[in-house]
């Protein structure tokens, strides 16, 4: 009896040790014993004993600089041995079957061999006329979707080794436009997948995601391919979440969890909620809405489209003004130009003619980043937030735009997003999406300087991540909750005092406008939403408008 009891206790200790290893592996920074104990709900002495044993075996290591624990090198030795025996085809077998059933088109698995993509397994289309995708077929890594998926996870040095001319080449988009190779790679990394539609009557359309090893290196790609007559661009984007999910599950490399696929389940309806009006937009990642009172129009950016759009609330529709690189809308210049920012810098656009010019470039060192939002301070000055294209925490920054150029105001942020200012202009608020927090700091309107940030509001895992924010005239902060099916209003202490449920899981940003100034415009996203979620939430990607009651 005592032996059985000891065995059960031993299993319990083993499970706790595994929980600790997994928890440490998901943290972007080393964790102390106290942090581990508090977050896992375990007694501190128990955690201390287990961590000491794991450290002795090389499964955890102590970081003296941060006074916390990170994964030990022995884990990587074990992972390397496991990877030496990996049978990729066996791991992908069920996923290929699933992708073929979902898409009814050919599902393909392939690996990189030098500067080529080689098909190592496939499932044929369920349609009568099958596409020919033989095992062993080779094609250049560029410009097909499968090879591009692998290239998107390689650094520039490795890409040059494959083909020195690639970084200076261009990529042809489905609409016939050519964009620089580097911009195509940044878009693929930001989206987590690649799409490609060939030219001609017999064009082939494909969507693929990279498969990463335990060190995050691209070793293969998986995806779906078929005739462009059956696979439209919208269908390729809709298939992407299931393909990304398969790629992550094959090697148990979840990539970056900030690039989420599955939203939380749709909450039950709440009686008495306002019914939003809808403007069709079809944005992959709508952001930075700006209301133009003189035109009674709403301007916004689709970061992942990418595009600058103008929406008409009266007609319930929108149209594309411009297709720049991935970027955000800022607002208007003193001269009346529409100002937006992308990887090339700050642009001034004349909406009447479509002509635009670059006034300032961005600081050096942002090649692996993309702009995520823009705030406007009380003087009308613009502040950009940037993040890693792969949503890696710790690579975010705030950029200050002035008449003389763009400078880095703050670095080493997680995944920064929206910024907003208090009505008196003396307090600035910043969203740290990956940390599920909103920070605040003192702001000097005279010299436009930001003081040290401190926590203002935190959001639970179950409620979605904060993204865009807007301040109303009474000093209350409105927050869009990504994967939270809602927007919330915070009181001056950072507590949720009002929640408005939405028919979409991914509200992204918001602003106040309309004739009365009390219409809440909400941008949304459909990027990486599975087809079944899009069927449940077909308004994803549209612009929502809610008339707020006076209170």
Image: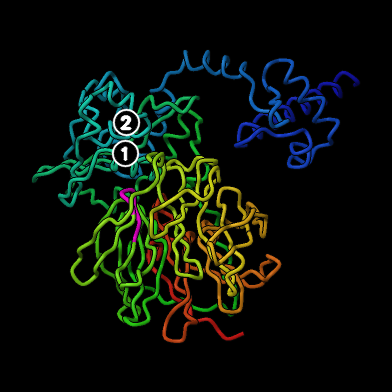
Mark 1: which secondary structure? helix
The residue identified by callout 1 is: 185
Q: Residues within 10 Å of mark 2 (few under 14, many from 20)?
A: many
Q: Which residue is mark 2?
A: 151
In-image side of 58 versus 276 (left or right): right
Q: Nearer the viewer, residue 496 or 448?
A: 448
Numbered range of the magenta stretch: 340-345
Give the dominant element type of the magenta stretch: helix, strand or loop. Answer: strand
Going by the image, does 394 lie left or right of 13?
Answer: left
128, above or below 20, in the image: below
On-image quarter of the N terminus: top right
Query: Where 250 sits versus 436, above or below?
Result: above
**Residue located at (40% from left, 66% from top):** 539
Image x and y of residue 417, in percent: 50, 55
The disc label shown at residue 435, or none = none
Q: Residue 178 placed where, x, y %?
A: 18, 46
Q: Residues within 10 Å of mark 1 (few under 14, many from 20)?
A: many
Left or right: residue 444 versus residue 404 is right
Q: Are marks 1 and 2 in contact (CB under 8 Å)?
A: yes
Secondary structure beneath dot 2 equals helix
Give 395 or 258, whichever is nearer the viewer: 395
Query: What is the quadrant of residue 35 in the picture?
Result: top right
Point 25% across, 51% down: residue: 233
The quarter of the displayed image where residue 13 is located: top right
* Quadrant in which the C terminus appears: bottom right
- Percent position (x, y) of residue 40? 74, 39
User: Residue at (73%, 42%) from the top-left corner?
Assistant: 39
Residue drawn at x 40%, y 45% as measured from the top left = 363
Residue 441 visible: yes
Q: Mark yes or no: residue 485 visible.
A: no
> What's the CA distance linking mark 1 and mark 2?
7 Å
């Amino acid at each position: 009896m005592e032996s059985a009891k000891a065995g059960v206790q031993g299993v319990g200790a083993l499970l706790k040790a595994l929980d600790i290893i997994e928890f440490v592996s998901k943290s972007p920074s080393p964790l102390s014993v106290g942090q581990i104990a508090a977050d896992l709900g375990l007694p501190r002495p128990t955690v201390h004993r287990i961590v000491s044993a794991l450290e002795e075996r090389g499964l955890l290591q102590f970081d003296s600089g941060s006074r916390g624990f990170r994964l030990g090198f022995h884990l990587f030795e074990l992972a390397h041995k496991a990877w030496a025996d990996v049978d990729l085809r066996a791991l992908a077998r069920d996923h290929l079957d699933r992708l073929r059933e979902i898409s009814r088109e050919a599902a393909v698995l392939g690996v990189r061999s030098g500067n080529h993509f080689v098909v190592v397994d496939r499932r044929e289309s369920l349609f009568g006329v099958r596409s020919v995708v033989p095992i062993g077929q080779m094609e250049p890594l560029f410009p097909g979707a499968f090879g591009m998926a692998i290239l998107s996870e390689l650094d520039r040095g490795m890409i040059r080794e494959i083909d020195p001319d690639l970084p200076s080449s261009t990529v042809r988009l489905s609409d016939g436009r050519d964009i620089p190779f580097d911009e195509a790679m940044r878009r693929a990394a930001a989206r987590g997948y690649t799409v490609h539609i060939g030219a001609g009557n017999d064009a082939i359309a494909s969507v693929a995601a990279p498969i990463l090893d335990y060190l995050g290196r691209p070793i293969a790609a998986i995806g779906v391919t078929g005739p462009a007559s059956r696979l439209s661009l919208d269908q390729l984007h809709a298939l992407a979440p299931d393909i990304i999910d398969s790629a992550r599950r094959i090697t148990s490399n979840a990539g970056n969890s900030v690039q989420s696929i599955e939203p939380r389940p749709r909450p039950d309806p709440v009686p008495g909620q306002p019914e939003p009006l809808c403007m069709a937009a079809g944005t992959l990642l709508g952001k930075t809405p700006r209301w133009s009172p003189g035109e009674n129009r709403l301007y916004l950016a689709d970061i992942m489209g990418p595009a600058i759009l103008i929406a008409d609330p009266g007609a319930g529709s929108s149209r594309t003004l411009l297709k720049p690189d991935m970027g955000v809308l800022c607002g208007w210049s003193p001269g009346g130009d529409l100002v937006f920012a992308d990887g090339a810098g700050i642009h001034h656009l004349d909406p009447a003619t479509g002509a635009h010019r670059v006034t300032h470039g961005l600081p050096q060192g942002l090649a692996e980043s993309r702009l995520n939002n823009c705030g406007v301070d009380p003087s009308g000055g613009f502040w950009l937030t940037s993040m890693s294209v792969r949503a890696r925490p710790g690579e975010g920054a705030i950029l200050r735009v002035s008449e003389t150029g763009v400078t880095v105001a703050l670095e080493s942020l997680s995944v920064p997003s929206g910024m907003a200012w208090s009505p008196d202009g003396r307090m600035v608020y910043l969203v740290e999406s990956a940390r599920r927090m909103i920070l605040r700091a003192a702001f000097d309107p005279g010299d436009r300087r930001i003081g040290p940030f401190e926590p203002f509001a935190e959001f639970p895992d179950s409620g979605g991540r904060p993204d865009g924010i807007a301040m109303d005239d009474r000093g209350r902060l409105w927050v869009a909750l990504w994967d939270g099916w809602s927007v919330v209003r915070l009181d001056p202490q950072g507590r949720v005092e009002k929640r408005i449920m939405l028919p979409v899981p991914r509200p992204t940003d918001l602003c106040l406008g309309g004739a009365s100034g009390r219409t809440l415009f909400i941008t949304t996203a459909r990027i990486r939403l599975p087809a079944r979620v899009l069927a449940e939430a077909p308004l994803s990607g549209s612009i929502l408008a809610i008339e707020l009651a006076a209170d």
